[in-house]
Amino acid sequence: MTTSKAMIKPVGRREWLAPAGLLLLSAVPALAGSVRLAELASDPVVTAENARFVTQPLPVVVHIVCVMTFSMLGAFQFVPSLRRRRWHRLAGRVLAPAGLGVALTGLWMTAFYDLPAHDNMVVNAARYVVGTAMAASIVLGVRAALRRDFVNHPAWMMRAYALAMGAGTQALLLGPYTAIVGTMSTVAYTTGMVAAWVINVAFAEWLIRRRRVGGMARRRV
């Protein structure tokens, strides 16, 4: 009996490593979003950097709230013990609309906000692809859940989550570069922004494949 308890405790701790890492990854964009919300809640001086947000605050406010909800609450969906409980389904009912809010407001801002000075059309084109792919993944994930397709449902939602977490990976890639080099070139900025989404999607696809292979192996046994 003592041995079984000793084995359960490390497993219980390990299952929280993934959500803890995801919460840390989402901390930087969440902090930046909180600063932006605090700025908009005051009476900010309009500058070239914040003019698009000050003149049309609703899309960015909805985007930030949805991103923080989707990234931080979504991290707990990776806890195996929670996925086996009713909590997973209840959280999903919040996460699906929040994720759509992230994708749709992101697309709206890409289309209608003025392009910032440090951005370019390549990054904007990538944002269109990411926003569309994220919205489609959530719709397909919800559709799979309604059909009780519990193989494809987590795969689609994982893809959507990976795309949403692009800002966290971008901070990891571009933050140290900026701190070391200083002013960032357009090529470096574009490469870092796009690479972050590619890395996240590649990791999600690897994890999806790994889980499917593991599930097939367990079914054979």
Image (cartoon, rainbow, N blue to C red):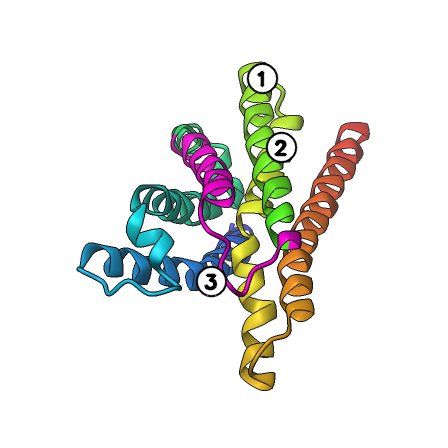
The reply to whether discs 3 and 1 touch (Cβ–Cβ < 8 Å) is no
Give the prevailing secondary structure in the magenta stretch.
helix
User: What's the residue type where badge 3 is placed?
Assistant: Leu
Q: Quadrant of residue 214?
A: top right
Please, what secondary structure does the residue beneath circle 3 have?
helix
As drawn, the label of residue 24 is 3
Q: Of helix, strand and loop, which one carries label 1?
A: loop
Q: Amino acid at mark 1?
A: Arg
Residue farthest toward the left in the current orientation of the protein:
43
Residue pictured at 44% horizontal, 39% vertical: 105
> What residue is shown with label 1?
148
Quadrant of the rendered image containing residue 33: bottom left
For the point 62% across and 67% down, the residue is 189
Give me the C-alpha separation between circle 2 and circle 3. 23 Å
The residue located at (62%, 60%) in the rendering is 193
Q: Residue at x 60, y 41 (%)?
A: 128
Q: Which stretch is magenta?
A: 94-122
How crowded pointer 2 is (Cα within 10 Å; few <14, some 14-19, many 20+) is rated as: many
Q: Few, some or many C-alpha atoms within 10 Å of disc 3 (few <14, some 14-19, many ≥20)?
A: some
Determine the residue located farthest toward the top in the rendered image.
Answer: 147
Task: Say whether marks 2 and 3 touch (CB < 8 Å).
Answer: no
Which is more N-terminal, label 1 or label 2?
A: 1
Residue marked by disc 2: 156
Examine the structure image and report whether residue 156 is included in the region drawn in magenta. Answer: no
Task: Tell me which numbered mark, 2 or 3, is placed earlier along the sequence.
Answer: 3
User: Does residue 44 lie above or below 143 as drawn?
Assistant: below
Crowdedness of circle 1 by 10 Å Cα count: few (<14), some, many (20+)? Answer: few
The C terminus - image quarter: top right
